[in-house]
Image (spheres, rainbow, N blue to C red):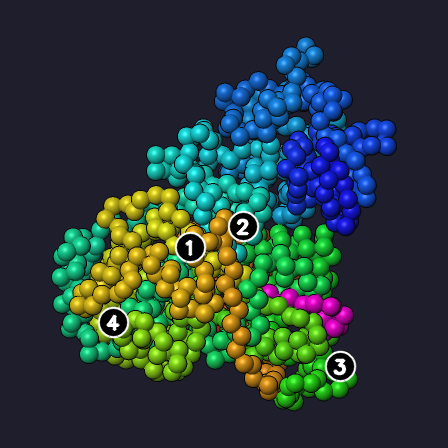
Amino acid sequence: MLKVTIDEQTLEVEAGSTVLQAAQRLGIDVPTFCYLKRLPPLASCRMCLVEIEGVRRLQPSCATAATDGMVVRTNTPLIEETRSSMLDMLLANHPLDCPICDKGGECELQDMVMAYGPRESQFRDDKRVFHSEDIRLSPVIIMNVNRCIQCQRCVRMCEEVVGAVALGTVEKGMDTAVTGFEGSLASCDQCGNCVEVCPVGALMSFPYRYKARPWDLVETDTVCPHCGTGCQLTVGTRKGEFMRVRSKWDEGVNHETLCVRGRFGLDFVASRDRIKQPMIRQDGALVPVSWDEAGDYLRRRLLAVESKDAGGLASPRLPNEVLYQFQKLMRTVFRTNNIDCSSRWAAPFDTLGPLLGTFYSRTPLDDVIGNDCVLVVGGNITEENPVTEYLLRDGARRRQTGLLMLSARPSRLDADARVVVRVPPGGEAASLAAVVAGLVAAAGQALPGAAFADIGRPAAGAGSDGPDRLAAALKEGRSVTVLVSVDLLRSPEARATLQQLNNLLHVLRLRGKGPAMQFLFDRANQMGAWDMGVLPAALPGLRAVADDAGRATLARNWGAEIPSEPGADLDAMLDLCVGGRMGALYIVGTDPLVAYPDRNFVTRALGAADLLIVQDAFLTDTAGMAEVVLPAAGYGEESGTFTNNEGRIQNVRKFREPVFEARGNLAIVDFVAALRNQALRPSTQPEIFDEIARLVPAYQGLTQDGLGADGAFTKAVPTPSAGMLPAPPPVPTAADRLMLITGDCLFHNGYLSERSDMLNTVANDPYVAMSAQDTAELGLSDGDQVIVRSGQGELTAQLKVDRQFPKGLVFVPENYRALRLNSLLRRGEYPCAVEVQKAHATLEVDRPGRIWRGV
């Protein structure tokens, strides 16, 4: 530790700390413009100059390392004069348009001038003007370059944090101008982080422009609803109307950054597609009714079907308290464990549970990224979890974290990775088994504490030496984090993949690597949904339904018995429907008709349920098939908590009132329970949180008041792990057909985001991504309208040629309802074999997916 004295105050700091960081620890305000905590110092604005005893010139505190015994002064007459002069130069060309500037009231230049600026300018020349009118760089970002103070925050944020390199500078000195390529940001992520960090009104949010002033806004700190990263954001409303989103440096995992969905995608709350009042089906059509009429009708229908099975499906975007109460309703009122929380894939709890209990690290992402190696398995992190990608890039560039990538799809993070291994979809298990084999072989002897199946070497034809390179990198690393995309759960090989992940983590632990593991969820509260027990084979706390002690504890507290047999997941529930055995199917906040593979089968199954109840904020395709529709509060209209990928539980706060006749989700669950002449206690959100904190082991001891601005971490609850490592699965053979895969795209996440007008403005049209090699063989060009056809159905969309994309794969985002992508997919089959051809053309095909010539 080093001892430093600043303005006659002494403190100890770690080696490598800057003078500015030391001053901030003492609460001493040193002004800055170019400095950002998450970026290397630039020292271009010269506002943070300080006097250091024994040094002749003033030094920039943001770039000057503290030394032992250093004596610093931050407020001498020379410093004050220098700051005033710097501000005078900035004001020399700065326009006098504060009354119409959207930054008014939160402009850092205004604040600096008030605190340190001259009272009269020394400059009398005409002000330099770049453009007479503001430039619309993109649908969401507008620029007034005349206001720019050349701090470079926006350019550096874009390049060094986001990795987009969409902004740059031209000219130099006082003539420096920030711009996009040819005055456009068409190729950027549209994340708006440049707007967030701009200290003045040079870069502005176009959707928010001229709508309100900061002092008009009521601001609410909450959590983003789009993915599992769990970014903190601040929502501004004016007279109850949504205005904007901003973020704060000092709160949450995201450290001021947001992706395009978080910053510009919350206007879905004001979508015109809201369910206005309860509806029941009469003569084949949904008819609006009152809540009392809906209750009378639903009571009769529930009584009529109570002799049959019941099932429940709840969205992992709902708060923990709603999910907990919903599974309690299904288990105690409907007497069933037929419960699920995903409408896209099944979670094999027999392998998932031990993995979560043994290796899941409920610790800050910053900490696990700080490990020596980070292995990202599956998915495309750039598009599924953008802010997590920012943090990983920061780890690779500033902290020298070794990034290792193993996936079917490329991501922008590949450019910062030490090892990138492309595998065919479903081939992750075999590749992980090869990595485990490499680590075991490198150990040179049996590792203590485990029995091994015959792991062996990867079979002949396993492909490149990528797994060997991964094994070598992991062997050299001192500590390892494994981040796993839930996209892997789409594959029929999901169980084998989870088993091999467990093998890998087990071997890494035996080798002393201290492995940490976290999922990269693409739904905001998927971790919470699992923790709350919205699973057919798991109770709250991820305890198995067959666990007599766990079941007895809950039954004693709930005052009702819980069925002892594991229930049916969504796929099995749909089979029950088709078989005529499903009485009431209760769906809350999710749309399986759009999301689950094989739309025709789902349509047939939902139509065969005796009673389909849909509780949702929006009129989804599934709601359109329901017999009873109950209008629920949407995001921002009720309070609760989310649990993010890290295991961090955070407050989701209400910032607007439910619209029309919508009721809170908890109130509707109580409403349904009362129709069965039962009551769920407790029933209010604070009371339910307290019960969760009492009965769910990972949440024990938490209080809602104690969550604070950054939330609080749930606890890992270890479970015994199996000693035997399963043998590796067979290596998948290379397909001779084009194979269709899906997932999220950058601008959309699921189908909620498609109700955002702003995201629809910036997002690509529905597209089909393919490699340059495949499209050349097919005679296709970027921008062509193409038909993608499987044995189940077809769709038409615009072709997007991706030179980084692997040969043989076709990617279509799952986020566009109009495409009905699930019409092409078959249950239990992923990826899906397809043909691709140019639309409006007759073509000869010698084998599926390979087009030779037009006719």
**Counting residues from the N terminus, which is met first, the one under dot 3 or under dot 4?**
4
On the image, the x and y values in percent for residue 708 come to 48, 50
User: Given the image, on which type of amino acid does mark 4 rest?
Assistant: Val
Q: Is label 3 in contact with label 4 (beta carbons under 8 Å)?
A: no
Disc 1 designates what residue? 704
Disc 3 designates what residue? 443
User: Given the image, on which type of amino acid does mark 3 rest?
Assistant: Ala
Disc 2 designates what residue? 252
On the image, the x and y values in percent for residue 273 come to 32, 48
Q: Between label 3 and label 1, give the one nearer the viewer.
A: 1
In the image, which disc is placed on residue 333? 4
Total label count?
4
Q: CA distance from mark 2 to mark 3?
A: 40 Å
Q: Between label 2 and label 1, give the one nearer the viewer.
A: 1
Which residue is painted at 77% across and 44% down in the image?
3
Span colored in magenta: 471-485
Q: CA distance from mark 2 to mark 1?
A: 16 Å
